[in-house]
């Protein structure tokens, strides 16, 4: 099973429209095209949609080591608004990995490369092995 197939089982992110573009060891990139369905009452991208985009990027990067990882704590800071027609990207980078924990920073940018939000998370790694492996070179 490929990592992309595995993460398609994240049914919420799949239903929202988050697409996983790239996975390397300790890194991932995901995309979300903003439509009317992603908007709040103020006609801006709903914070939960941005959080979901960042969360899937986190999951892919944290699970890239081949063991099941779950978020312990996550926080997001919204810096700039976005709206319909925007394409948002989340790039997750591993900043620390220990025996059972890890720490990740995720930047969410728009199609112009402007920073929309930052997301940080710590994870706990279980001993459960995943049905895929990811090399340092890519998918």
Image (spheres, rainbow, N blue to C red):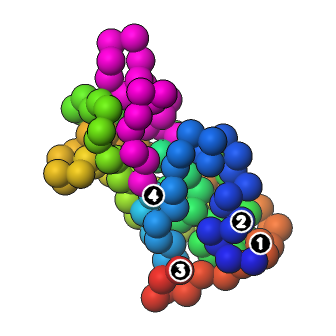
Look at mark 4 in the image and give the residue it sits on.
30
Question: Can you give x and y, in whole percent of width and height, for residue 85 in the image?
Answer: 30, 39
The secondary structure type at the circle numbered 4 is strand
Mark closer to the chain start, 1 or 4: 4
Question: Can you give x and y, in whole percent of width and height, for residue 102 in the image?
Answer: 55, 60
Look at mark 2 in the image and give the residue it sits on.
6
Q: Residue 130: which disc?
A: 1
Q: Are marks 2 and 1 in contact (CB under 8 Å)?
A: yes
How packed mark 1 is, by other alpha carbons closer than 10 Å (few <14, some 14-19, many 20 or more), is some
State which region is magenta.
Answer: 31-52
Question: Can you give x and y, in whole percent of width and height, for residue 130 in the image?
Answer: 77, 72
How packed mark 2 is, by other alpha carbons closer than 10 Å (few <14, some 14-19, many 20 or more), is few
Q: Of residues 95 and 11, which is closer to you in this image?
A: 11
Mark closer to the chain start, 2 or 1: 2
Question: Can you give x and y, in whole percent of width and height, for residue 103 in the image?
Answer: 49, 57
Q: CA distance from mark 1 to mark 4?
A: 20 Å
Mark closer to the chain start, 2 or 4: 2
Magenta-colored stretch includes residue 51: yes
Q: CA distance from mark 3 to mark 4?
A: 13 Å
Front label number (2 vs 1):
2
Q: CA distance from mark 2 to mark 4?
A: 14 Å
Front label number (3 vs 1):
3
Q: Are marks 3 and 4 in contact (CB under 8 Å)?
A: no
Residue 50 can be seen in this image: yes
Query: At 32% across and 23% down in the image, what residue appears?
Result: 44
Magenta-colored stretch includes residue 107: no
Look at mark 3 in the image and give the residue it sits on.
139
Q: CA distance from mark 2 to mark 1?
A: 9 Å
Position above or below: 21 against 33:
below
């Amino acid at each position: 099973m490929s990592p992309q197939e595995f993460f398609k089982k994240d049914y919420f992110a799949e239903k929202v429209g988050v697409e996983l573009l790239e996975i390397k060891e300790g890194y991932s990139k995901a995309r979300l095209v903003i439509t009317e369905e992603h908007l709040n009452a103020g006609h801006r991208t709903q914070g939960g949609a941005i959080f979901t985009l960042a969360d899937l990027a986190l999951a892919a990067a944290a699970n890239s080591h081949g063991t099941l990882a779950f978020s312990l704590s996550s926080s997001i800071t919204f810096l700039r608004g976005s709206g319909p027609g925007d394409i948002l990207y989340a790039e997750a980078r591993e900043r620390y990995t220990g025996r059972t924990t890890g720490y990740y920073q995720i930047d969410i940018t728009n199609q112009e490369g402007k920073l929309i939000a930052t997301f940080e998370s710590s994870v706990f790694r279980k001993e459960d092995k995943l049905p895929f492996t990811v090399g340092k070179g890519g998918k």
